[in-house]
Amino acid sequence: MFEKIVFHITSGKTDGLSINGDKKTVAAAAQYRSTNTPNDPFIKVLFTDSSGLILLLHDEQIYYSQKKIGHLRHISNSAIGSAGYVEYEDRKFLLANKGDYQFVENVLIGSPNDIEGECRFSDYISRDNKHILSLAVNSYTGKRDDVYATLIDESAVVVKK
């Protein structure tokens, strides 16, 4: 099933997906790599309703973000990667990936202006390993591109034929 989801996105299809029963339309998608894990490509998908998916290709995991959060103002730029933990939505997140840098390998849907581009980031993971808080500074704009996402089962994503 994971491969079917990836194929749907990499084929450039913008419709035919639903997540937890909600129909989604893809606004943009791109495949990335990062300097800390160069052999583990991932795909980020932005939907027209500002929700999104992160597909970890090596681990075959799917993270779902209900909305784009942009900038968590209670966490300063200088805290990204230097704080051992951060808190968000009554959860404590532990630093798991410090000082990484993502770069676009391939724009799949949309244009480079439609999708998050290159950025410096650090990932924080919840204690139960089901939530990720990725704190990022966009390399082109200098603005924050923070993402909060939850690990979901691939059965939550339905690909329409």
Image (spheres, rainbow, N blue to C red):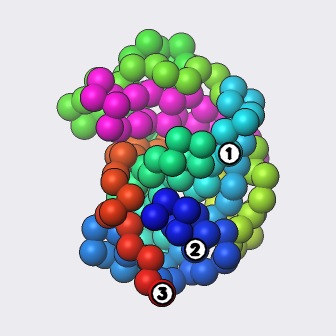
- Residue 39 percent coordinates (x, y): 73, 36
Q: Where is mark 1, residue-wise? A: 41
Dot 1 surroundings within 10 Å: few (below 14), some, or many (20 or more)? some
- Find disc 2 in the rendering and name its residue: 8
Residue for point 51% across, 48% down: 60
Disc number placed over residue 161 in the picture, else none: 3
Q: At label 3, which amino acid type do we have?
A: Lys
Q: Does the residue at mark 1 contact the one at mark 3 (Cβ under 8 Å)?
A: no
- Circle 3 packing at 10 Å, graded few (<14), some (14-19), many (20+), is few
**Residue 125 falls in image quadrant:** top left
In the rendered image, residue 9, in percent from the top left (x then y), is placed at 60, 70
Q: Earlier in the sequence, mark 3 or mark 2?
A: 2
Q: Do the residues labelled 1 and 2 touch (CB within 8 Å)?
A: no
Q: What stretch is highlighted in magenta?
A: 118-143
Type of the residue with mark 2: His
Residue 68, quarter of the rendered image: bottom left
Foreground of the two, 71 or 9 = 9
Identity of the residue drawn at 64% across and 22% down: 99
Kindly identify the residue that appears in the image at 34 percent across and 31 percent down: 129
Residue found at the very far right of the displayed protein:
105
Q: Is the magenta stretch mostly helix, strand or loop?
A: strand
Q: Note whether 161 is above or below 57 in the view shown.
A: below
- Does residue 125 sit above or below 161 in this rendering? above
119 lies left or right of 71: right
